Image: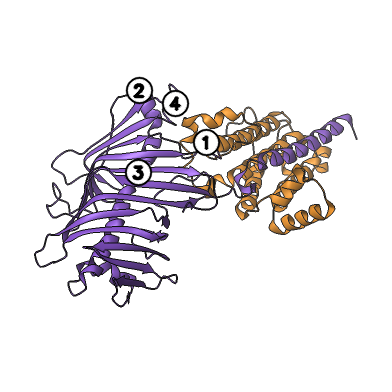
């Protein structure tokens, strides 16, 4: 073997050694080769500041107070997403509302107080697999229990004989004038919880969109409007969507973790949700979704002015008077903790 | 016009690489540059599309928000196997650059491909379990190599990425290169 060939062979061996070292070196940090990190628990807390009105086309409900406490598990490094299904609602969850019928023939009227009495597995438009809540109307308590099999719902009003309904029938009972008023109010309470949860998820949209605009917000500076586009092709009034970097709390000079942001919509149709939205929302203690692992991530979002259509709107210049909607002032807080067991 | 190889030399070699190329150093440099580009692609994937940096890259890169902004945009099915593709392409092109137009070339390329495939296949669950059981029974401390085989995650897409890299590298290495003066 000539010297040149010997050198070539040595270089080849070095190449192969480098190939192995490179594979081993990157494997430690390669997602494919890592052991699964423990799941992270996200605890959330949703509450109101002032009345929240929910119009569903049949009744006008006014939630005078509510606190939704709960948690869900997610993989490390995933976003905090309240769109997670299902979530667990804790026994501290309570909500109260006044119900007023739009239709005089609809006799469902009154004030109810409801609370989760056993951890409730909950998701939007989804039958809970387990859990229980109570609804109190004029001193009569109705206990609603979701079966562990997920097949039916048991409703016990006062000392009367318990009755069992399918989940669909239970949800529809609020509008069924042939049913007992306590059962209807319990159904109404559950439906209102779903509407509040639906609106809560707007904070996720804001968080995600701030993340997409961080560089732009940083380039234009603090307290400067960043005009964004939002759809509303049928509107007579121009839609506006403005985002602002409010204050540079942490990591001075950089828009990001720990900072506060705001977003304001007017006359805006959010394509992703197919919803008409008018809102001013502020996000405090913003945290990047893909930050270091493990991490402590949290944010608080307050929708100071909120108009949120609960169903996609007809293409009209403005929403109809009886349009299903939610108006109000809602505060959402969410924070992560490294824990395998959800907080009860 | 290219420089013609002596007839006896052409008979000795059996590789298209060795017969179709001029004797200039251009292919070796080009292959080396290709290997560097593949390594750059791998680094780019880790910096802009993955959540964790390999040890060879500076940690401060993970704090640059402009780089992290694209992570959510690229699907996992693409970011997962891309490093395997870049790694295999870099190894194969570097092998071609080193081996040059010698009789070693084909064998060296084949060995490099086998090595890259082996680095993926040793992460198969069967190997994982065997190595984990063996190291446990023998009381061996899991060094980097054993950990790679015991805890690696096998992915069919990674194997496919290596094969694809081999096809691309073969095409790059064997494609005809007009020498100076040959414009057509």
Label 4, label 2: how many angstroms apart (C-alpha)? 15 Å
- Which chain is mark 2 on? A
Chain B tint in image:
orange
Residue B21 % position (x, y):
70, 36
Label 4, label 3: how many angstroms apart (C-alpha)? 21 Å
Label 4, label 1: how many angstroms apart (C-alpha)? 24 Å
Residue A284 % position (x, y):
37, 34
Q: Which residue is mark 1?
A: B48
Q: Which residue is mark 4?
A: A250
Chain A tint in image:
purple
Residue ID at (85%, 30%): A4
Q: Are marks 4 and 3 on the same chain?
A: yes
Question: Please, what secondary structure does the residue beneath circle 2 have?
Answer: loop
Residue A87 % position (x, y):
42, 55
Q: Nearer the viewer, mark 4 or mark 1?
A: 4
Left or right for A321, reference A42: left
Q: Are marks 3 and 1 on the same chain?
A: no
- Which chain is mark 3 on? A
Q: Which residue is mark 2?
A: A221
The correct choice, above or below, for B61 with respect to B120 in the image is above
């Amino acid at each position: 073997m000539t010297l040149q060939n010997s050198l070539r062979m040595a270089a080849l061996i070095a190449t192969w050694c480098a190939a192995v070292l490179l594979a081993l070196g990157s494997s430690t940090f390669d997602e494919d080769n890592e052991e699964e990190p423990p799941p992270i628990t996200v605890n959330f807390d949703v509450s109101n500041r002032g009345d929240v009105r929910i119009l569903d086309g049949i009744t006008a409900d006014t939630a005078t107070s509510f606190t939704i406490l709960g948690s869900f598990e997610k993989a490390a490094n995933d976003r905090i997403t309240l769109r997670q299904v299902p979530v667990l609602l804790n026994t501290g969850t309570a909500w109260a509302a006044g119900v007023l019928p739009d239709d005089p023939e609809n006799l469902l009227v009154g004030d109810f107080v409801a609370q989760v009495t056993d951890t409730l597995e909950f998701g939007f438009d989804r039958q809970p697999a387990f859990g229980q809540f109570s609804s109190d109307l004029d001193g009569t308590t109705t206990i609603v229990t979701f079966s562990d099999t997920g097949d039916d719902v048991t409703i016990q009003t006062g000392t009367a004989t318990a009755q069992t309904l399918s989940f669909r029938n239970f949800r529809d009972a609020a509008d069924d004038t042939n049913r007992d008023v306590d059962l209807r109010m319990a159904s109404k309470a559950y439906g209102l919880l779903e509407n509040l949860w639906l609106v809560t998820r707007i904070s996720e949209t804001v968080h995600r969109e701030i993340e997409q605009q961080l560089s732009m917000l940083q380039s234009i500076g603090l307290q400067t409007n960043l005009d964004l586009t939002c759809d509303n092709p049928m509107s007579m009034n121009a839609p506006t969507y403005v985002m602002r970097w409010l204050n540079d709390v942490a990591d001075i000079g950089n828009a990001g973790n720990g900072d506060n942001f705001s977003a304001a919509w007017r006359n805006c149709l959010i394509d992703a949700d197919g919803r008409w939205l008018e809102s001013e929302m502020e996000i405090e203690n913003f945290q990047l979704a893909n930050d270091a692992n493990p991490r402590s991530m949290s944010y608080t979002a307050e929708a100071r002015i909120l108009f949120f259509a609960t169903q996609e709107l007809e293409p009209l210049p403005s929403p109809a008077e009886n349009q299903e909607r939610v108006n109000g002032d809602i505060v959402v807080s969410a924070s992560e903790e490294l824990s395998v067991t959800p907080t009860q | 016009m290219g420089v013609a190889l002596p007839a006896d030399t052409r008979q000795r070699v059996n590789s298209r690489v060795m017969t179709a190329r001029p004797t200039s150093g251009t292919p070796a440099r080009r292959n080396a540059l290709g290997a560097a580009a593949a390594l750059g692609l791998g680094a780019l994937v880790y910096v802009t599309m993955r959540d964790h940096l390999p040890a060879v890259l500076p940690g401060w890169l993970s704090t640059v928000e402009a780089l992290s902004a694209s992570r959510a945009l690229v699907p996992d099915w693409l970011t997962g196997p891309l490093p395997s593709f870049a790694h295999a392409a870099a190894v194969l092109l570097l092998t071609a650059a080193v081996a040059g137009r010698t009789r070693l070339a084909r064998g060296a390329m084949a060995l490099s491909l086998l090595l890259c495939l082996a680095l993926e296949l040793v992460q198969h669950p069967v190997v994982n379990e065997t190595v984990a059981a063996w190291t446990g029974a023998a009381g061996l401390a899991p060094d980097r190599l054993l950990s790679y085989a015991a805890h690696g995650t096998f992915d069919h897409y990674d194997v496919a990425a290596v094969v694809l890299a081999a096809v691309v590298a073969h095409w790059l290495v064997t494609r005809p290169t007009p020498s100076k003066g040959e414009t057509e």
